[in-house]
Amino acid sequence: MKKVIVEGQKEVAEFECDHCGKDAHGQLSIHFWYGSKYDLTQGTVYLCDPCADNLIKILKQNFNINIEMKDITEL
């Protein structure tokens, strides 16, 4: 969950994990295109590291999805 601390030209915000409420340092976004029952919608989940680890583990075990983590400074 995003909480805006200071409104105005420069936004200052903090993020908390949508699962456990601890400080979040990451987000997972999902976007849907035409043809989906979720046509042209998107969602964002904010996660702390332990909850992100659990979600990555669930995706790997239950859906056979391996997320390759890349250094964003090299993209």
Image (cartoon, rainbow, N blue to C red):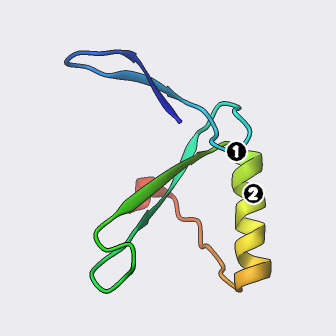
Type of amino acid at the residue the image marks with label 2? Asp
Type of amino acid at the residue the image marks with label 1? His
Query: Residue 63: image x %, image y %?
Result: 70, 83
User: Which residue carries the number 2 mark?
Assistant: 53
Residue 9 against residue 51 in the figure, above or below: above
Total label count? Answer: 2
Around disc 2, counting alpha carbons within 10 Å, would you say few (fewer than 14), some (14 to 19), or many (20 or more)?
Answer: few
Q: Secondary structure at mark 1?
A: loop
Seen from the viewer's position, the closer of residues 7 and 26 is 7
Query: Residue 62: image x %, image y %?
Result: 77, 80
Asked if residue 38 lies left or right of residue 14, the reply is left
The first of marks 2 and 1 along the sequence is: 1
Numbered tag placed on residue 19 in the rendering: 1
Residue at the spot x=69%, y=54% of the render? 52
Query: Residue 34: image x %, image y %?
Result: 27, 81
Residue at the spot x=37%, y=82% of the render? 36
Q: Which label lies toward us, 2 or 1?
A: 1
Question: Which residue is farthest left?
Answer: 9
